[in-house]
Image (cartoon, helix red, strand yellow):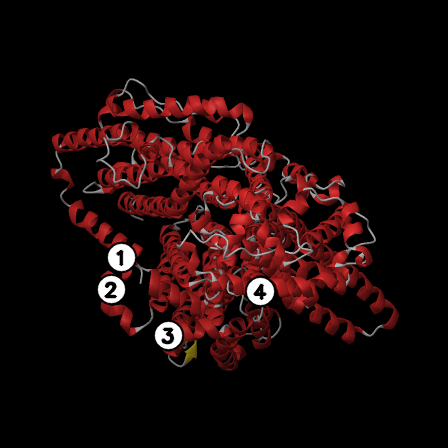
Amino acid sequence: MRPAQDNQGSFLGRISIRRNQFTDVNTEQEQEDLELFQKHIADRFTELLSPPPQPPSDETDSVASVAATEQIMSVTWLRKLMDVFLCCEAEFKAILLMGRDPTQISKPPFDRLVPEMLDRSIKALDICTAVVNGIDSVRHYQRLAEIAVAALEQRPLGDGNVRRAKRALANLLIALSLEDKENVTGGNKAIERSWSFGRRGGGSSAASKGGATIGQLKSSSWAVGRNWSAAKQIHAMTTNLTPPRGNEAAGLPLPMFIMSTVTVFVMWVLTAAVPCQERAGLANHLPVPKHLNWAQSLVGIHEKIGDEWKKKEKKGSAGLMEEMTRMEKLGHSLIEFADGFHYPAEKEAAESAAAQVAEMAEICRRMEEELVPLQQQIREVFHRIVRSRAEILEVLEQAGKLSAPVV
Amino acid sequence: MEKNDDKDPDHNDQSKGEEKGDVVSNTHPPDESDGKENVDVGNAETEQDPGDNVDSQGEEIQQTLESLSEELDQLLSSLSLHKEEHKDDTEEKGEADADYFQIPQFVGKFLDLLEDKLSKYDSGDPKTVWYQDQEEVSSLLEAVDRVSKLMGLLLNTKSCLDHHEPLINHAGSIQQRAMAFLEDEFRLLLEESVIKETTLATDDQQDHQNDAVVSQDQDQVTVQESGDQEIEYPGYSEEMVVLLRKIAEKMKAGGYGWECREVYLVGRRNILMRTLKHDCEFEKVSIDEVQKMSWGELEREIPIWTKTFKDCSSRFFPGELKLAEKIFPGDDGSLFCIITHGLTIQFLGFAEAVAMTKRSTEKLFKILDIYETLRDSFPSMEELFPEDLRSELRNEVTSARSRLGETAIHIFSDLENSIKSDSSKTPVPGGAVHPLTRYTMNYLKYSCEYKDTLEQVFKSHSKMEQEEEGTNSSACSAFASQLMRIMDLLDGNMEAKSKLYKDIPLSCIFMMNNGRYIVQKIKGSAEIHEVMGDTWCRKRSSELRNYHKSYQRETWGKLLGFLGHEGLMHNGKIVKPNLKERFKSFNATFDEIHKTQTTWVINDEQLQSELRVSITAVMIPAYRAFMARFGQYLDPGRQTEKYVKYQPEDIEDLIDELFEGNTSSSSAATAKRRT
C-alpha cells in the first residue's frame, strides 16, 4: 500500500546497518565510486548527444521519421533524458547517503552545500509542474493538428475540408507563437486576438475565411503561480552553483556539484522544450563548466539547444520540442497550401500537401504515443526529487541527534 | 474517432475521380431520360445563377429549408437504398452506368438556402439571436443534419463520388461553414451563459439583501439562497444544456466532433479556473513560493486551499463531469479528465509544498487540516476519474499524505526535543506553573482535537518507531504512547526545574502547580482524557498528594514544633523565659513563612483553598490548644500583647493570604493585624 515508504524504510535500514562500518570506508573506494559516477554521467550524455545507430527499421517507418525520433529535443529523446536523469539521481543518492556517517554531511562545507542543493530541488519541482502543464498545452496543439490532418486527408479534397483544416491550423499557429509571450504577461491579449477572428467581433464572416477561433487556454489554467518565472528559477538554481575547488574537488562536493548541474540542465531543457511560464532570457542562464570531462557532451547538447533557443526566442515560440518545431513548419506551409487552394485541387500541390499531411499525421501519432508517458516520467521525477529530499533531511536529522549535546 | 467517419478509404484518389466525374457527366446524356427536369446538379450549381432558379422553378419561389426538407429526406433514403444496392458493385468497376444516381436540382437550392441562413446570422443582425427561437434552432440544426447525412452518403457511394464531385465540394463547403458557425456559437454559449450566471448570482445576492431589509423575512431569503447555491455550478439552464448537447451531436454527426470537444475543453478549463478564483479566491502558488512565505501568509493560504479542494470534490468536479456527460453522452469522462487532471496535480503539489516547509510546532494543526481534507474529500473526487487515472491520482495522494503525516510525526518529535532541551536555569518566581508546561499542555490539548487523525497518522506513517517498539505499540496506540512519552519528558523536565528552587517547600509548590495544571487540562478535555486514561490521572493525583504532604511537613512541621510542650515545664512549673522564647520564635517563623509564602503562587483556586484549608486544619487547633494551655502564664496586658502577637483568628486570616503571589507583601502581616 505504501511502496514509496517501504522503500525508504529499507533504504534507511541499510544506512543504519552500514553506519557502523563507516570508519572502514576507505577513501580509495570512495575515489573509485566518484570516478565511476563521472564516467557514467559522461557516457549517458554522450549517448544523448549522438544516439547509437538505429537497427534497420522495418518498412512501415520511413527513414526520415526514424532519424527524427532520435533527434535532440524529440519526444523520444526527452523521454530518454528523463531516464538518464533518474539513473544519475539514483546513483548520486547512493554515493551521498549509503554507508556514510550521517554527521559527515552536516559538517562544513556541507552545512552550506546540502541546503543549497535542497533549495535547487524545490525549484526543480516547480519546473516539473510547469512542464507537465506545458505538455497539456502540447496535447492541445496535437488535437488541433489532428483536426487539420483529418480534414486534409479527406478525399475528394474540397473547399470545405481545406477551410476546416485552415481554421484548425490557424488556431494551432496562434497557440504555438503566443503561448509563451503574451499568454503569460498579458494573458488576455492572446485571447482577444484570437477572438477578434470570431464572427461577432469582426462583423464579417470569419468563419468562411477560416479564421482562428477556438481560443487559447488562459495562462491561469496552466501557470504555476502568480509571479513565477521559469527563467528566473533556472537562474536562481545556478547562482551558487560553482565547481568545488581545492580539497573539496576530490570529495563529496564534486558529485553534489555534478548532480546539481545535471538537474539544472535537465530542467533547463524541459523548460525550453515545451510551453512554460515566463522564459525570457532562458539562453543566458546556464554556466556549464566546459573543461570538465564529464560535462563535454552535456555542454554539446546545451550549445545546440541554446543556439536554437536564441533563434526562436525573438519570434516567440511555444517550445523547441522537435515535433512542435516541425508541426509549426508544416502548419505554415499547409496554411499556404490552403490559401492557394482552388477547387478542384491542383495535382502537384495536392500531392506535396498530402506528403506534409502524412508527416503531420506521423507527428501526431508520435505525440499521441509519447506525450502521456513523458508526462508520467516527469511526475516520476517530481516524486523522486521529493523522496530524495526527504531522505536527505532524514539523515541530517539523525546527524543532528547524534551530534546534539547531551543535556 | 469521428474524424475518420466520412473518410472512405476506397475513394482517396481524388484527382482521378474528379476528372472522371466530369467526363461522366458530360458523356452520359442517356441518363437524362430518367428525370426530365433533373440536370446534373454538379454542373447546375457551379454555374448557378439566382435568375435561373427563378425562371426554372416558377411558382416555387417561396421554397424554404423546411419545404425542401421532406423532399431531401426522401432523396436521402433512396440514396441510401441505392448505396446498399450497389454496395458490392464497387469492386466490379466496369459497369459505370448501372449505378449512376441522379441528384435532383433542389439539393442545390437547399444548400443555397442554408448558406443564406448562415450569412444572415453572420451579418450580426442583433435581432436574430437564433438560439432564442426554438423554430430557428430546429430549422438550423435539422438542416445541418441533412447536409451531414447528404455528405455522408455522397462520400460513401461510389457512383456519387464518380459523378457528383462538384456537388460534393459544394455541399462540403456549406457543411464546413455551418460547422464553423456552430463551433463559434457553441463557444459563445458556453462562455456567455456562464457570465450571465455569475452576474445573476451577484444580482441575486443584492436583491436578497434588499429584500431582507424591506421584508425582514430572513428565513425565506436564506432558503432561497441556499437553493440557488445547489444548482449554481456549472450554471447553465436545462435548455442551454440541451442546446449545447444538440450542437455537439450535430457537429459530431458531421465529423466535426473534435472541434466541438476542443472548444469545450478550452472553454471549460478557463471557466473552471475563473470560478475557483471567484468563489474560493484560489490562485496557484508555486512550491518555491510556499517555502518562502511567512507562516502568517501560508496560514491564510491553507484554508483557501482546503475550501477549494473540498468544493472541487463536492461541487465543481462533479459538476464538470455531469456537464460533459450531458453535452457529450458516452464520452466516459475523457473530457472531464483533461479539464481537471492538471488542476488536481497542482492541488497535491501544494500539499507536498506545505509538508516541505521548515517544520515548526505551530504548523501541526494546519498540516493536519490538509491531511484531513485529502483523506475526507479525495475519495469522492477519485470516484469521478476513470480507473487508470484514479490509481495514478491515488498514488499521488498517498504520497502527499505520507509526506504530511511524516511531517506531523516529526513535529511531535521536535516537541519532544524541545522539551528535552529546554534547560532554562531561571526558576519561575513563586513556583508558579512553568510556561513550558502551559505551552505543552495547551498544545497537546489542541492536538487531541485531532486525536483520531493523529492516531491514524502515527499508525500509518511512523517508520522508525514501529520497528523499534513493535510490541509496545500494540498495547496502546502509537499516538497515545507518543503522548505518554511527552508527558514523561515534561515531568522529568519539571522535576529538574524544581531542583532550581533552594526552598524545598517552594519546589513542592512548583511541582503541585504544574502537576495540578496538567491534571486539570487533561480532565478538562474529553479527548486527551480518553487518551491518557483514568489510571494515569489517579496516579498523578496521588503524586500531587505526596508533594502536598511534604510541603506541609517542610513548612508547617517546623512551626508546629514551637507549639509542643516539651521544655516549657520544669518540675510542674512553667519556664517563663522559655515560653516567651517559644512565642517569639513562633511569631518570627510564622511571619517569615507568611512573608515568603504570600509571594508564592498557586494559580489553581481549588488547590489554593485546599492548601489553606489543610494548613488551617493543622495549625489552628494546635495553636488554640497551645494558647489555651500556656496563654494564661503570660501577664495580661503588656506582656501578652508583646508575646501573643496573633489570635487564632489572625493566623487563620493570614493563612488565607498565602500563595497570592503578592510581591509587595512584606508588611502585609502587620497591616492585616491592625485591620
Q: In this view of the protein, which residue sits in the foreground, A192 or A346?
A: A346
- Marks 1 and 4, how far apart at CA: 69 Å
- Marks 1 and 2, how far apart at CA: 17 Å
- The tag earlier along the polypeptide, 2 or 3, is 2
Residue neighbourhood size for the residue with mark 4, other residues' Cα within 10 Å, grouped as few (<14), some (14–19), many (≥20):
few
Label ID, residue B469: 2
- The tag earlier along the polypeptide, 3 or 4, is 4
Q: In this view of the protein, which residue sits in the foreground, A70 or B412?
A: A70
Q: Is residue B138 above or below residue B340?
A: below
Q: Amino acid at mark 3?
A: Trp
Q: Is residue B343 above or below residue A186?
A: below
Q: Position of residue A298 (x, y in %)?
A: 31, 26
Q: Do badges 1 and 3 share one subunit? A: no
- Marks 3 and 4, how far apart at CA: 92 Å
Q: For mark 1, what is the residue? A: A6
Q: Position of residue B448 (x, y in %)?
A: 46, 67
Residue neighbourhood size for the residue with mark 3, other residues' Cα within 10 Å, grouped as few (<14), some (14–19), many (≥20):
few
Q: For mark 4, what is the residue? A: B78
